Amino acid sequence: MSTDTTTQTCTITVDGVPVVVPAGALLIEALKMQGIDIPNFCYYHNLPAQASCRMCLVRIEKMPRLQPSCTTVVRDGMAVEINTPEILDMRRGMLEFMLANHPLDCPVCDRGGECELQDNAFKFGRVDARFTEEKHPAPDVDISPFIYNDAQRCVFCYRCIRVCDIWMDVGALAKLNRGAHETIGTFDGWLDCEHCGNCVDVCPTGTLLHTSYKFGPRPWTLDETETTCSYCADGCRVRLGSRGDTVHRSIARDGTGINEEFLCVKGRYGFGYINSGERVTQPLVRKNGELHPATWDDALEHVAKRLGEVSKAKGADAVAVLGSTRITNEGNFAVAEVAKAIGTPNISYEPDYDLSTFMKSVGGRLATKADVLSADVIFVIGGDPKEDQPLTAHHLVQPVFKGKAALYVASSRLVRIRKRASKFVHLRPGGEAALLLGLAGGSLEVAAKAAGCAPSDIESLRSSLEGGRKVVVMVGSDCRGAALEAASSLGTLLAQGDREVTYRPLVFDNNSIGAFDVLGQGVPYASITGSLGDSISALYAVGADLMDGEDAEAVRARLGRLDFLVVQDLFMTDAALLAEVVLPASTYAEQDGTFTNIAGEVQRVHKAIDPVGSTRPDWLIASQIARLLGAEVKYRGSVSAVYRSLTESNPAYANATYVRMMTEGAVQTERPSASPDRSALVSALTSATAATDTTARHNEVPTEMGERLFHLGTIGKYSKLLADAFEDGKAKGRSVEEEAALIPLKSV
Amino acid sequence: MLTPEREKKIDELLTRYPSSRSALLPALWVAQEQYGWISLELQKYLAIRLGITPEQVREVVTFYSMYNERPVGKYHLQVCCTTPCMLMGSDDVIGYLEKKLDIRRGQTTADGLFTVSQVECLGSCGTAPMLQVNREKYDENLTYEKVDALVDRLRAQAEGGNG
Ligand code: SF4
Ligand code: SF4
Ligand code: SF4
Ligand code: FES
Ligand code: FES
């Protein structure tokens, strides 16, 4: 919002009718609240005013000329005319100019049907065209693997440019040439940027468009489903547009979620894996050494029988069960029921972040979007949201741009987020604990020496952090052990003061926190993978990338020694190829459920299409296995019942009901905050500092745009558009030299 | 990419303004003086030099017709075609030049002598139609005869080697 919400109101008249509006509001927004839409192009609710399109002009009493309602602030007694012949004539005139060089090719334009220019021309424009001049034709051109540009359709509202500058902090779009020859373009014809596609989604015309939707179905023929992104832990709300069994696009519209209209490259263009031809679509059971299609009944009975056999022969402990940071909470909950039915303690998942340490010591609430946007100090240590949590990065630069918050960054890597930092402390590898010791009031000399920075850096950072009233600490995965404990309770280490500190663990996978909440009480992941083929003889692995690490060959050997392996996944992973039974799971787009995001907020996953092939949701498969193993499963066929059982067993989720999510969107889980012992933290930091390798050299290689943002991961790999763009290097980021030149402050 | 004197000139320009972005216009002149035009490579170089994005540089280069993104001939004939000049016949003038030199606007003659460009208002509407050769003084109230004379004069100048 470009205005502060206030309780003060004032009265204006609109075409003679008095209406009460919030004082200080922009006229266009005040009228919108009354349900009165003023046509506009360059206005956008969370972008700075531009007032260049003149579409929103209105007559205001006593003002000599028509005034733009997108920059006019309401005043008590203001008399506004919005529907007079004069205004209608003006709108007709503005549109006539905008259409002067427009190709008028709506029938073949992919924006047709959801085009603001088309809508306004239809409502307010002329029927005929009076210009007889030749148009300047401009063929559409691809400007990235994801975006194409049909320059002739532009109305020069510059929403795209402002979005790239301000939402993305990238600045890759340019307005080229001038006058009648002006176009929106790029520096050299190809975009070097983060490829988020947000510029496309805010474009009110068919100028910037998604290649993934070129000549796609007309928007009004799509079924649209609001759900939660399956890539990163930021948990953007996405709207999947599907027709029949196929997902055609993923967009964010109407500002409905925590991300409003923001998406990143993966969330927007990475939906291809859903309808990938490489999905496993039917259960497979190995017979005579080969995997053969089987019915669900046969496959599930086989699984239950074999798990039962191993457990009977070698003890329940010989069976292990793995869930995943990727699947829904309901999926993991049902997977845990299988372990319970067998009676094995060996349940786990592969964590992407040491959440058990973080949650044990976290000194306050998990920071929500509102906390980030209203912070006055943001401290990022040991992580890079620019590459790993794109929505977090977008949110955190907004108060910085507005001058409301100061950003401080400490990292052993030259992280991209340092670009907007008031101060960047470049640590030596492993220097996080030492820095935190210094911040906690330990000897500056000792801390600085081990951290690899100057004592004055630590001192000034400390006073900056202590000066904050609303502090958000973002703890990256470079913080480990004592450093992780200390960073997640930084508030207790700083001098006492009147300040609220909230925390955000920079986790990666879409349901990292949910997996921790549901499966975190199990045994450590390594203790399972390390015992496969030894004390563990049977494994039920759900959505687990068992062989994605460097030790893939060792894992293969271990898996080979198992008596029984059942893999439940979307694709024929390397582990699935070794399995005795492969159970085909549905993607998030084919099921209902929940994910828990980076702020510990639970959000709904909604089914957009029917399960592909004969796949089934993880929660359904797992609960069927649990039932066959003799467990009393209450929730046959109802995912909401699975979730209800989850909320009953986990108090943090007690108040996060489906009903609340329906009305509120994201509902934060309620966790007791730890009360970490300050002196224990300091002594742990002291030993960690003493153990720091002070000969370790600083890493001087700057993080490149896209270095991890363009990393595919399992599901990305099967999303053709993403995979093609990233693997052959067609999707490039801005070069390190150019980025470095934009950094206002030198690192220390 | 620039001669040491020009680099020094840019250093000096950078001290003149509170924000380096403001030094862009004069810095582009300095660069164009050396090459006669400003390549994308040179634009990128200046962006890094000034701490702004290459896009910000190109926006300015393409906005002003005084900056050339391509090499131009020895004589750059910039014909104003904005409304007052257009009403006074600039379309005829530029069309005449195109025919006479056998090139289209934006092109350069094979001998490298002339480039014809269509530009926006040069602020001399009172003497429309008009054109400007390189950065020299305007040729105004143009007629076909004046255009003939101008081209002859420039050709002679080039042959005489004192252009
Ligand atoms: S896709 Fe690229 S150009 Fe468009 S807003 Fe995103 S970063 Fe900017
Ligand atoms: S490309 Fe679209 S968003 Fe950008 S200026 Fe043109 S109409 Fe506006
Ligand atoms: S920022 Fe994260 S949640 Fe949002 S679209 Fe990208 S991957 Fe999905
Ligand atoms: S919306 Fe107000 S001038 Fe464009
Ligand atoms: S219109 Fe040609 S000089 Fe102004």
Image (cartoon, coloured by chain):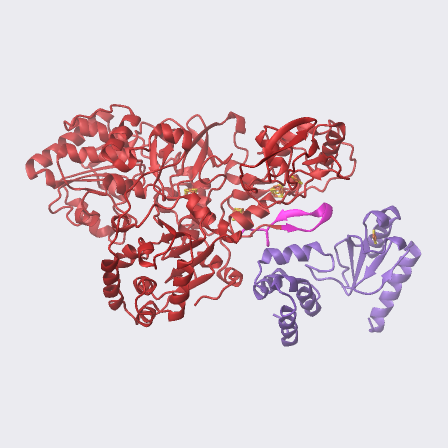
Chain colours: A red, B purple
Residue ID at (24%, 67%): A691
From the viewer's perspective, is residue A526 above or below residue A44?
below
Asked whether the viewer can see residue A125, the reply is: yes
Residue B138 sits in quarter: bottom right
Q: Residue A182: percent from the left, percent from the top?
A: 69, 47
Q: Residue A221: percent from the left, percent from the top?
A: 51, 25
Residue ID at (42%, 46%): A371
- Left or right: residue A348 compared with residue A36: left
From the viewer's perspective, is residue B30 above or below residue A303?
below
Asked whether the viewer can see residue A582, the reply is: no
Q: Nearer the viewer, residue A492 or A483?
A: A492
Q: Residue A607: percent from the left, percent from the top?
A: 38, 29
Indicate the quadrant containing the C terminus of chain A: top left, top right, bottom left or bottom right. Answer: bottom left
Q: Residue A23: percent from the left, percent from the top?
A: 59, 38
Which region shows up in magenta?
A: A175-191
Q: Nearer the viewer, residue A210 or A284?
A: A210
Residue ID at (29%, 55%): A484
Residue A4 sits in quarter: top right
Magenta residue check for A172: no
The residue at the far right in this view is B145
The residue at the far left in this view is A313
Number of numbered callouts drawn: 0
- Left or right: residue A670 compared with residue A312: right
The residue at the far bottom in this view is B5
Q: Quadrant of ligand 2?
A: top right
